[in-house]
Image (spheres, rainbow, N blue to C red):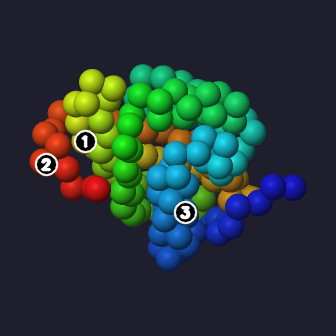
């Protein structure tokens, strides 16, 4: 059986561990590695896209990081309760035309008893920035 500690119910400290692990995984830009943190039948809403299952996540993340170059993410604890964690985040990337963006958003996460994320709902907005305005390098 797959397990991904820490397990719910979360304390503030274990919620922050989970958030840091997610940030580190996403910054690896490795779709396979990232997908293993989710249940096989995970349910996502990412912007206007609805995604179900690990394979769909791998495909989504592969497309994402082919378009979002020099991607760098920072996640921040917002709150937690039992098996749920809320985070705010921002990330920067450039597109293939060399235009830079900063994306801001919130995520609501729900975990199963094995510490795998079964639901992820993300609301995200992009802001065009100049390369000189980058925070994350």
Foreground disc of the pair 3, 2:
2
Residue 69 location, x and y as percent?
38, 37
Extreme residue in the right direction:
1
From this view, report whether residue 86 is shown above or below residue 32.
below
Residue 17 location, x and y as percent?
53, 70
Residue 68 location, x and y as percent?
39, 34
According to the image, label 1 marks what residue? 102
Q: In percent of the image, x 36 and y 57: which residue is there?
A: 74
Is the C-beta separation of discs 3 and 1 under 8 Å?
Answer: no
Alpha carbon distance from label 1 to label 2: 9 Å
Give the quarter of the image for residue 100.
top left
Q: On the rendered image, what quadrant is the N terminus found in?
A: bottom right
Residue 122 in the figure: left or right of residue 97? right
Alpha carbon distance from label 3 to label 1: 21 Å
Viewer can see residue 89: yes
Which is nearer the eye, 121 or 72?
Answer: 72
Label 1 Cα crowd, 10 Å radius (few <14 / some 14-19 / many 20+): many
Question: Quick one: label 1 or label 2, which is nearer the N terminus?
Answer: 1
Label 2 Cα crowd, 10 Å radius (few <14 / some 14-19 / many 20+): few
Q: In percent of the image, x 43 and y 38: which residue is there?
A: 122
Question: Quick one: label 3 or label 1, which is nearer the N terminus?
Answer: 3
Residue 21 location, x and y as percent?
55, 63
Question: Quick one: label 3 or label 2, which is nearer the N terminus?
Answer: 3
Residue 130 in the figure: left or right of residue 46? left
Is the C-beta separation of discs 1 and 2 under 8 Å?
Answer: yes
Alpha carbon distance from label 3 to label 2: 27 Å
Element marked by disc 2: helix
According to the image, label 3 marks what residue? 21
From this view, report whether residue 84 is shown above or below residue 108.
below
Number of the label disc, if any, that sits on residue 133? 2
């Amino acid at each position: 059986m797959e397990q991904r500690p820490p397990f719910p119910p979360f304390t503030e400290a274990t919620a922050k561990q989970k958030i840091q692990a997610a940030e580190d995984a996403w910054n690896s830009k490795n779709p396979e590695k990232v997908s293993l943190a989710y249940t096989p039948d995970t349910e996502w809403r990412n912007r206007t896209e609805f995604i179900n299952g690990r394979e769909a996540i791998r495909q989504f993340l592969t497309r994402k990081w082919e378009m979002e170059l020099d991607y760098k993410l920072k996640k921040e604890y917002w709150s937690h309760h039992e098996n749920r964690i809320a985070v705010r985040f921002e990330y920067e990337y450039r597109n293939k035309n060399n235009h830079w963006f900063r994306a801001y958003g919130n995520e609501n996460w729900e975990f199963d008893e094995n510490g795998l994320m079964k639901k992820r709902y993300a609301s995200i907005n992009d802001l065009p920035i100049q390369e000189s305005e980058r925070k994350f390098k």
